[in-house]
Image (spheres, rainbow, N blue to C red):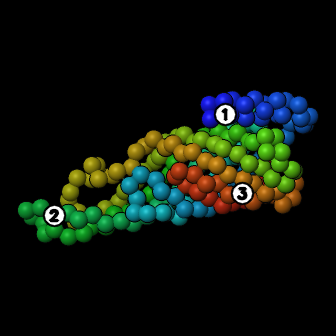
């Protein structure tokens, strides 16, 4: 196995170097997606909306500033000496903001003009607001449970329907989306 991995990597490198490709432009793309996400301590998959604008940085590499938004309602069981124990509801809204770095594997996979394949990573911070039900008197900070740091890993693909429109599927560790890519 130790001999096979370097051999495969060397073969891929030589193959990639011997192909003559014009550098494809992946950037100048507005990506609008909806999907299901899990971020922090939420009660399951949450519907979310994501928008980013992708621009070329280097060969097969783009950066895309992004903003995502999702909200959900959950319940917390609380009580004290003056209040009977019961479930209190709270509404949480999370808005991650950051940048997504994407590397495209089209040359490696010998993908045609209609397909893009990529791996990516996102990093940023999340703006989190929580509103508790009237009467809840417990600790409002300790139960927030959502880190302000946002980190996500992605793999995905885009199918180009036309020169300016594509459909993409982005599977990730936090927010998987299906969306429309508008190439400007």
- Judged left or right of residue 154, residue 26 is right
**Which residue sits at x=46%, y=47%?**
127
How crowded is the residue under tag 1: few (<14 C-alpha within 10 Å), some, or many (20+)?
few
At 58% from the left edge and 42% from the top edge, which residue is drawn?
Answer: 122
Q: What residue does disc 1 label? A: 5
Give coordinates of residue 149: x percent, y percent. Answer: 45, 41
**Discs 1/3, front:** 1
Point out which mark residue 168 bears: 3
x, y percent for residue 144: 33, 52
Rendering coords of residue 23 (x, y %) = 86, 36
Quarter holding the N terminus is: top right
- Judge whether 35 appears above or below 21 on screen: below
Q: Image quadrant of residue 162?
A: bottom right
Residue 76 vs residue 133, the one in the foreground:
76
Q: Mark 1 to mark 2: distance in Å?
A: 58 Å
The answer to whether any part of residue 25 appears in the image is: no
Mark 2 lies on residue: 79
Residue appearing at x 53%, y 64% in the figure: 47
Query: Which secondary structure, mark 2?
Result: loop
Q: Are marks 1 and 3 in contact (CB under 8 Å)?
A: no
Is residue 86 shown to the viewer in this render?
yes
Q: Quadrant of residue 9?
A: top right
Q: Secondary structure at mark 1?
A: helix
Asked if the residue at tag 2 contacts the one at tag 3, i.e. Cβ–Cβ closer than 8 Å, the answer is no
Disc nearer the start of the sequence (3/2): 2
Rendered location of residue 71, percent (x, y): 46, 61
Q: What distance separates the C-alpha of mark 1 from that of mark 3?
A: 31 Å
Q: Say whether disc 1 or disc 2 marks the residue closer to the N-terminus.
A: 1
Most foreground residue, 103 or 32: 103
- State the separation of the CA atoms marked 3 and 2: 47 Å
């Amino acid at each position: 196995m130790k001999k096979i991995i370097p051999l495969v990597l060397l073969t891929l490198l030589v193959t990639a170097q011997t192909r003559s490709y014009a550098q494809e432009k992946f950037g100048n793309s507005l990506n609008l997606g909806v999907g299901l996400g899990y971020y922090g301590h939420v009660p399951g998959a949450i519907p979310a909306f994501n928008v980013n604008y992708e621009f070329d940085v280097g060969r097969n590499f783009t950066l895309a500033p992004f903003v995502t938004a999702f909200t959900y309602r959950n319940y917390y069981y609380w009580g004290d000496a003056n209040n009977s124990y019961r479930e209190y509801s709270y509404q949480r809204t999370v808005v991650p903001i950051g940048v997504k770095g994407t590397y495209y594997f089209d040359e490696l996979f010998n993908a045609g003009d209609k397909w893009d394949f990529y791996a990516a990573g996102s990093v940023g911070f999340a703006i989190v607001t929580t509103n508790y039900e009237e009467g809840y008197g417990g600790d409002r900070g300790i139960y927030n449970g959502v880190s302000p740091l946002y980190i996500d890993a992605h793999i995905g693909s885009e199918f180009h329907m036309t020169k300016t429109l594509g459909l993409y599927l982005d599977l990730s560790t936090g927010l998987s989306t299906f969306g429309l890519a508008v190439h400007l």
